Image (spheres, rainbow, N blue to C red):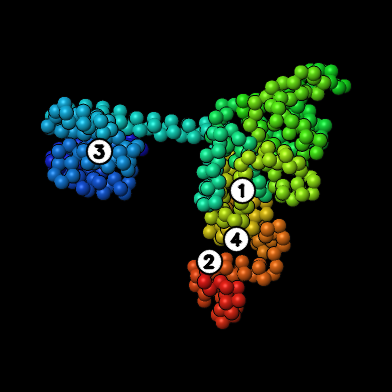
Amino acid sequence: MPSQGKLLIVDDEKVALKNLEHVMKKEGYEVTATQSGAHALAFLEKQPFDVVLTDLRMEKVDGMQILRKCREACPDTEVVLITGYATLESAVEAMKHGAFYYIAKPFRLDEVRKVVAEAVEKIHLKRENRSLREQVESFQGKVKIITQDIKVQRLLEMARQVAPTGCNILITGESGTGKELFARYLHAHGERSEGPFLAVNCGAFNEELLSNELFGHTKGAFTGAGTDKKGLLEAATGGTLFLDEITEMSPAMQVKLLRVIQEREVLPLGGTVPIKVDVRFIAATNRDVQDMMRQGGFRQDLYFRLNVVNLHIPPLSQRKEDVPLLAYHFLRKYAALMKKDVTEIAPDALELLKVYEFPGNIRELENIIERGVAISTGAVIEAAHLPEDLRDLSIRTFRKKDGRIPSLEEQEKDYIRWVLEEAGGNQTQAAQILGIDRVSLWRKLKRYELEAE
């Protein structure tokens, strides 16, 4: 029979403790019992309990101390206090500090059973509600951005700060880094979260079609326009419009968008009366906007209107500690979607993922894990389930540095630094991995000034 819940029973009276332990085990609870309040505190530090059933008056560590410990360290644990010295003051004090219930001795076992059952039910309901809330938030786009990288965590902190302001934001970063996810995160944490979030890829339409998507048209505006069509700018009123790949927008469309941002109104194709709009703009691009402005490909005035705050998302190659975290996130996602019992990634497969450069960033990692789940025949994604050319690609993939191609010396320096980090600073082991002798490594460390790092 599955456990009804985990109980910790604390009473310095041996007989009373044994009776409660016997009764609660018969009820189906997983019980830990102790006569010592100090031992109870130690148990609470080691493992979670649903309910703590404790005597109030005990030597050294009493029931109130256990209650306070639970409120500080185990906020989800409910505490039931039992005492033979019941007073109104002690009952009020216990409830004030968050006790679930206060039972006076001599108690009836039926009363204890009922109180513990209600406490456990409360815990289960709390967990169920939390789970449902997390599911609802994920379906509504209020998803958490999965990271343990300090740079991305700082970005998230900035995003939380600027989200409620309603200012326009420009998100930059390579393709596949999660720019739209950041845009949804900003929307979800802003004052417009109850409003619509609409997205359009500016590079997916020619100028005429994009104009129709954004501004809409009136009935009869052109051949085939049988009804009025509301544009995304009007539809997004009260919410957020995400303009992905904004730098793909034609110069003429840039002028039209700039006017909308300045005047807060749109004129549908064929219309004669402007329509007021109230939209927050979040734009994104994978291109160098500064370079495009210098070359005349992007309007400077539009840039300044959109770039009130800039969030630059680093590529996955610069946040390698997130690779295992994201890999297991996608593993759970696709195992559930495909209804497959795949739960693990083999260590050698995970190591391949960690050293790979991911030119396609998070989107590429997701694709690789989806493929691994699809072709896996057991509970583990093995190295054989990864793309055959992944190891070769990890060697042949290079990235630009500050917009330029790095030299061979820079590549070698970065590679030696990485091998040293992987070897935990052990130069002998690093030399073996590099396939050179210890003296040659020493010379390279001196040459590249890596000894001080």
Q: Secondary structure at mark 4?
A: helix
Residue 150 in picture, x, y percent from top left: 52, 52
Q: Secondary structure at mark 1?
A: loop
The dot on residue 342 is none
Q: Is residue 104 left or right of residue 210?
A: left
The dot on residue 421 is 2
Q: Is residue 422 left or right of residue 21?
A: right
Residue under circle 3?
A: 67
Q: Nearer the viewer, mark 4 or mark 1?
A: 1
Q: Secondary structure at mark 3?
A: helix
The dot on residue 355 is 4
Residue at the (66%, 67%) spot, across then down: 411
Q: Nearer the viewer, mark 1 or mark 2?
A: 1
Residue at the (55%, 29%) spot, across then down: 191
Q: Nearer the viewer, mark 4 or mark 3?
A: 3
The dot on residue 313 is 1
- For the N terminus, the image quarter is top left
Task: Rate crowding at label 2 as few (under 14), some (14 to 19) or many (20 or more) other CA atoms within 10 Å.
Answer: few
Residue at the (21%, 28%) spot, across then down: 92
Q: CA distance from mark 1 to mark 3?
A: 44 Å
